[in-house]
Structure formats: C-alpha cells, structure tokens
C-alpha cells in the first residue's frame, strides 16, 4: 500500500476509554468496599464474581431487588454534587427488600458514563459505601463502564443490585391483612428518588439550571439542596418491630395509588386521611409552580410519606410510639368499586 493509505496506530484511549484511569478507580473502590465487608464475604474485589457464604439461618429465603435513582441524577450533574446520590441508591434498594422483612446482605453497583471522571466516581462510591456500612451490608462487586458516544459528556447512569435474606416463616407479604387494620405512615425526607422528570419540567431545570441555586423561603434552603436531600432509610428503625407488621409498602413511583395495592389482598382497599400528616412544603411549591391537579400529585409523588405500614389496630399505638414521627394515616377497608386507594 502507498504511504498515503497508511493510518496512524489506534488506541483504546484515543477512542475514549482510559484503561489506566479505570484501574486506578478500581483500586479506590476496592479500598472503600473492603470497609463494608462482613465475615460471610469470602472473595475479594477483583475476582470475576462476588462470593458470600450464607449461614446462620434455618430456612433462608433470598430477596433481591434492582433499582436506580431516576433523573435525580440530572440534578446532581447540574450542581456537580455527587456525594449523596450513592446514598439515595442504597437506601432505595434497602427499603425495597425491607417490604418483605428482609435484612440486607450484599450489594453491587453499576456506574456508566461516556468518559471516566475519577472525582465523580469516587464521590458516588463513598456515598454508597457509607450508606452500606450503616445497615451492615457488604459491597462485594460492581461495574464501572466507559461508553463514549452513548452518554452525554458529564452525565452518567447509576444502578444498584441488592440481595437480602429473611427466614421463610417471617416473610411479610400482606396475606394476613384484613379490613379494619391500621395504616401507619413514616415521613419521607422529601421527593426521595421519584417524580424528578416532572419537577425538571415544572421548573425548566434543564434549560435554566441556575434556578437550582435560588433560595426559597418556604423551603429554608435552595431548590437544589432540597431536591438532592437523600432518600430516607427505614431499615434501622423497623428491624426490631417487624413481628408487629403485616404489610409494608415503599411509597415510590406511583405514589399511594401505585404502591399500597401491591400489598393488599384482593377485595381490600386503603382509606387514607390526607390531614393526618404534614405535607412538606416542597410538594406545595411543585404543585403551585406547575399548576398540577392534586390527584396527579398523589400519583407521582410520595407527598411526605416514604413508607406505609399495615398492622392490627391493637398494635398501632405501640408502633407509632416506637417510631419517631410515625403517624396513623388511615385504615384498610373493604373494596367498593374499582378504586383501591381512597384519599379523603
């Protein structure tokens, strides 16, 4: 071939993937992850799989879940603040498996971006590791992917995978719920990880990200600070009280109508008293700015209740006294018509 047809040598780095930077990040992640290890972890990070020895249970049932944090990531990227988004991820996943009474065992994460940004990855991992240590869950593996051309520069995706365990005879599945049972609400810390696509549209955040730095007196802080408030974790407070609980609903995407029916036996509905708890001001601000119908608000957001518990009427007082800020917000009733959640 002629000289003019010769091409310069190609490298992976020139294509947008920096293997050396990735290796450096892996060493950082290994250090953070080892600090979360439990005695049951029998493999180190760097192997092709994570190994966890399950022991100490009579009839163990493994409980798994996978989730992300939605477009809350867009807020983190707009503010270049990434140290809380990993906390969101862990707490969301822990809460999901808690709904059937499971204790968290181990966790894996997936981070994908166009080009590796070591500072961002380190902030995310530090948040993940600190949240896992608080609940005694091990970070035993994960994946950090560089995919130039697939993700916009400066943005990323984040996913968490969790495995927990519960004794078979202690599974909480809602089957024992009956009409007359009490519904107890546990306050959220704000939006948690749902409804951000609507919020971004309401405030036109994508086009005018400077609005995130605006101080709102009713919030007592900026909009961005409010929107990045971490998802609350309910596992530590509920762990000793699980024997008293018949059903647990994590109020995430879909709000009350989308989540409470998931734990109710056929023929039953939930009657929720709207004035039984104080709705945080962020929801009123969103509703006002977006001219959003109240019914739509309850379909999109948690409206200040991050977790709903169902218990026998006789256990309701004990549970509300044992859990700070818990409120009796409704009761289980016989279903009449198509609606399974009635908010009055």
Image (cartoon, rainbow, N blue to C red):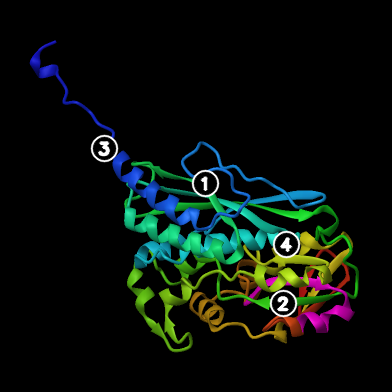
Q: Which of marks 3 and 2 is in front?
A: 3
Residue 111 vs residue 77, the one in the foreground = 111
Q: Give the range drawn in magenta.
A: 304-320
* Residue identifier under label 3: 13
* Residue identifier under label 2: 185
Residue at horizontal 81 percent and vertical 57 percent from the top: 171
Residue at horizontal 76 percent and vertical 55 percent from the top: 166
Quarter of the view holding residue 91: bottom right
Q: Do the residues labelled 4 and 1 touch (CB within 8 Å)?
A: no
Q: Distance between the residues labelled 1 and 3?
A: 25 Å
- Mark 4 vs mark 3: which is more N-terminal? 3
Q: Do the residues labelled 3 and 2 touch (CB within 8 Å)?
A: no
Residue 226 vs residue 207, the one in the foreground = 226
Asked if 104 appears above or below 294 in the picture, the reply is above
* Residue identifier under label 1: 141
**Residue 99: mark in rendering:** 4
Residue 31 in sight: yes
Is label 4 in a helix, a strand or a loop? Answer: loop
Horizontally, residue 110 falls left or right of residue 79, namely: right
Q: Are marks 4 and 3 in contact (CB under 8 Å)?
A: no
Q: How far apart are marks 2 and 4 (CA)?
A: 14 Å
Is label 3 in a helix, a strand or a loop? Answer: loop
Q: Nearer the viewer, mark 2 or mark 4?
A: 4
Q: Nearer the viewer, mark 4 or mark 1?
A: 1
Label total for image? 4
Q: Distance between the residues labelled 3 and 2?
A: 51 Å
Q: How far apart are marks 4 and 1 (CA)?
A: 24 Å
């Amino acid at each position: 071939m002629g000289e003019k047809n010769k091409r310069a040598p190609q490298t992976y780095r020139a294509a947008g993937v920096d293997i050396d930077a990735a290796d450096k990040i892996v060493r950082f992640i290994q250090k953070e992850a080892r600090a979360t290890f439990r005695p049951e972890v029998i493999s180190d990070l760097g192997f092709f799989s994570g190994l966890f020895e399950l022991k100490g249970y009579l009839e163990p049932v493994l409980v798994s879940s996978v989730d992300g944090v939605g477009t809350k990531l867009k807020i983190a990227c707009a503010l270049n603040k990434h140290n809380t988004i990993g906390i969101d991820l862990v707490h969301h996943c822990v809460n999901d498996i808690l709904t059937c009474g499971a204790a968290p065992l181990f966790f894996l994460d997936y981070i994908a971006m166009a080009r590796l940004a070591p500072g961002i990855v380190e902030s995310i991992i530090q948040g993940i590791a600190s949240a896992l240590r608080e609940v005694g869950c091990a970070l035993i593996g994960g994946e950090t992917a560089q995919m130039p051309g697939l993700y916009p520069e400066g943005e990323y995706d984040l996913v968490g995978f969790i495995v927990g365990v519960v004794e078979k005879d202690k599974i909480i599945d809602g089957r024992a719920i009956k009409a007359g049972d009490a519904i107890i609400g546990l306050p959220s810390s704000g939006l948690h990880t749902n409804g951000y696509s609507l919020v971004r549209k309401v405030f036109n955040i994508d086009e005018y990200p400077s609005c995130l730095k605006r101080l709102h007196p009713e919030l007592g802080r900026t909009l961005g600070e409010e929107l990045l408030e971490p998802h609350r974790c309910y596992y530590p407070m509920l762990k000793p009280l699980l024997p008293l609980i018949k059903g647990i609903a994590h109020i995430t995407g879909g709000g009350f109508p989308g989540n409470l029916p998931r734990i109710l036996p056929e023929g039953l509905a939930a009657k929720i008293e709207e004035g039984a708890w104080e709705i945080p001001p962020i929801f009123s601000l969103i509703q006002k700015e977006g001219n959003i119908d109240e019914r739509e608000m309850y379909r999109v957001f948690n409206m200040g209740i991050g977790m709903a518990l169902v218990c026998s009427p006789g256990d309701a007082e004990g549970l509300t006294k044992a859990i700070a800020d818990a409120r009796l917000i409704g009761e289980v009733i016989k279903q009449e018509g198509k609606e399974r959640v009635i908010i009055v």
